[in-house]
Image: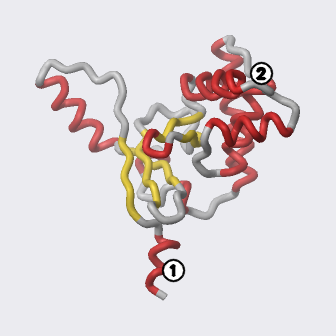
Amino acid sequence: MSPSQTSEPPLGFARHDHAHCVADALEAAEAWCAQEGLRFTPVRRRALEILLEEHRAMGAYDVLERLQSEGLGAQPPAAYRALDFLVANGFVHRVERLNAFIACAHPGEDHVPAFLICTECRRVAETVVLPGMQALGAAARASGFRLDRVLVEAEGRCARCQEQHAS
């Protein structure tokens, strides 16, 4: 069973070896870029590192501020181009509801992400909707519709916020 098919909690709400996950994601991005002949520029790499380090959804301007404070990407287009590259290559996902970006929790895997967004603390967890995706794909095919992109975002309260309200 692949990691995306397990019943483990989504990464954004679970404890894990953070240093290991950052290193693995950067390694996957470097390998993909080398394999595909893509330039993994310092700005692209640092934008991915920022999202990985924060382990939360961040707006483009938040990423831009960090890049600027470090002397990288002084203009907004630099941050947007880096984020566009990272999204296009599956290293980062855009969370539409928050108009923000989050590092992919399953780099290198072919998957359809689903985002669980806490309405209180605004943390976001990525999970995978494999069984639901199969049903949606079948329904689309049956009606002659071709899926280009699927977006799944759910809002609720994470366990930490639920516990805080129960106390």
Q: Which mark is residue 26?
A: none
Where is residue 150 shown, x and y percent of the image? 34, 32
Amino acid type of the residue that numbered disc 2 sits on in the rendered structure: Thr
Query: Tag count in the figure?
Result: 2
Q: Would residue 26 be seen by someone viewing this image from the given angle?
A: no
Residue 94 vertical position relative to residue 153 in the rendered view, above or below:
above
- Tell me whether circle 1 and circle 2 mark residues in contact (CB < 8 Å): no
Mark 1 and mark 2 lie on one chain; the one further toward the N terminus is 2
163 relative to 25 in the view: left or right: left
Q: Residue furthest top?
A: 37
Q: Would residue 94 be seen by someone viewing this image from the given angle?
A: yes
Name the front one of labels 1 and 2.
Answer: 1
154 relative to 36 in the view: left or right: left
Q: Count residues near mark 2 (Cα–Cα under 10 Å), then give few for <14, some for 14-19, many for 20+.
A: few
Q: Secondary structure at mark 2?
A: loop
Q: Name the residue beneath numbered marker 2.
A: 41
Residue found at x 68% / y 20%: 33
Amino acid type of the residue that numbered disc 1 sits on in the rendered structure: Gln
Residue 74 vertical position relative to residue 58 in the rendered view, above or below:
above
Residue found at x 56% / y 28%: 87
Q: Name the residue beneath numbered marker 1.
A: 164
160, 17: nearer the viewer: 160
Residue found at x 77% / y 27%: 43
